Amino acid sequence: MLNNKKIWQTLAIIAFVIIGCAFLSQTLTSSKTLYEYAQENQELAYGEMEEETTENIIATSETADEILPTESSSEEEESYSDRFIYTEGFFYEPIADEVKERIMGISYPAEGSTEITLEELAYLNVLYNDFEGSIQTGELICNQYIALDLLEIFEELYRNGYQFEEISLIDKYGGDDTLSMEHNNTSCFNYRIVDGTDHLSKHAYGLAIDINPFYNPYVVYNKDGSGETYISPQGSEAYADRSKDFPYKIDENDLCYKLFIEHGFTWGGNWNSSK
């Protein structure tokens, strides 16, 4: 057992060592704490690190501005704030500037008054199965009033493998409804009048949609019911006889017909003087 004198000598030595270490650390680090000194001399403090680890630390500290969200990324997120996503691949949103540039002066008048504003329309992104069975991305413009209905319908058709040849904005065809139909393009909005009349089509309000129109053509009959007087588009005459069976024909047994009727749409096939 140590006597009192030896105890005091031991304590004095310990105190001297503590004071000496503190003085030395202060001198070596130029008034920095040991933690600060270790951060600036990591190899001395922690030993050599792998190159990849060092790069990660540099990226985290010296280039943080490149990693953290910037003002532009915040603006990009804000641009999608009005987007409604139904399911993956199916969404609608207001008409963006890029879309306006594509449709202005084509499907939407560049000048003069219209009976519908761009703010009343919606841009839709949908997925669909093409005639080869491949998955494609389609786009539509419609009245905001039916935007959710169309998303629900097209998502259901997609899940059931229903096939479309093409779903593109009619602007791809210069706003030419006949040309779009000749290419069997499924489309909705087009600010136009009904053929042979002076009144606006339901398409002008974004409230009508043509589905695989080459195989489901527009047919006008004689008033006496003796036969057709007009079939559009050209080349689709073989599909005007709806008593025949052929692919992509819409009738009352067709899933497309059933879904649209369930959502409150009317079907051109039920019209009298035209179909």
Image (tube, rainbow, N blue to C red):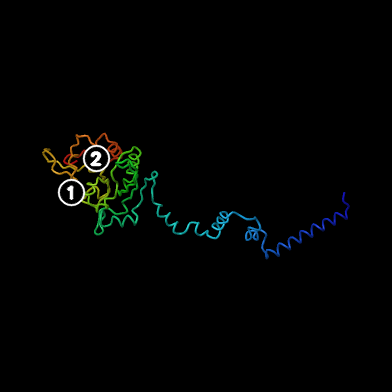
User: What separation in Å lies between label 2 and label 1 (alpha carbons)?
Assistant: 18 Å
Q: Secondary structure at mark 2?
A: loop
Q: What x and y, as percent, mark residue 139? A: 32, 48
Q: Amino acid at mark 1?
A: Asp
Residue at which label 1 appears: 195
Nearer the N terminus, badge 2 or badge 1?
Answer: 1
Q: Secondary structure at mark 1?
A: loop
> Label 1: few (<14), some or many (≥20) within 10 Å?
few
Given residues 219 and 39, the one toward you in this image is 39
Q: Is residue 3 left or right of residue 78?
A: right
Residue at which label 2 appears: 267
Residue located at (17% from left, 43% from top): 231
- Residue 239 location, quadrant: top left
User: How many marks do you count on the picture?
Assistant: 2
**Above or below — where is 227 with respect to 108?**
above
> Label 2: few (<14), some or many (≥20) within 10 Å?
some
Given residues 127 and 103, the one toward you in this image is 127
Q: What x and y, as percent, mark residue 148? A: 34, 44
Q: Is residue 200 left or right of residue 38?
A: left
Looking at the figure, which quarter contains the C terminus? top left
**Above or below — where is 30 with respect to 122?**
below
- Residue 256 location, quadrant: top left
Residue located at (20% from left, 36% from top): 242
Residue located at (69% from left, 64% from top): 28
Q: Amino acid at mark 2?
A: Trp
Specify the label residue 76 is tagged with: none
Q: What x and y, as percent, mark residue 171? A: 27, 53
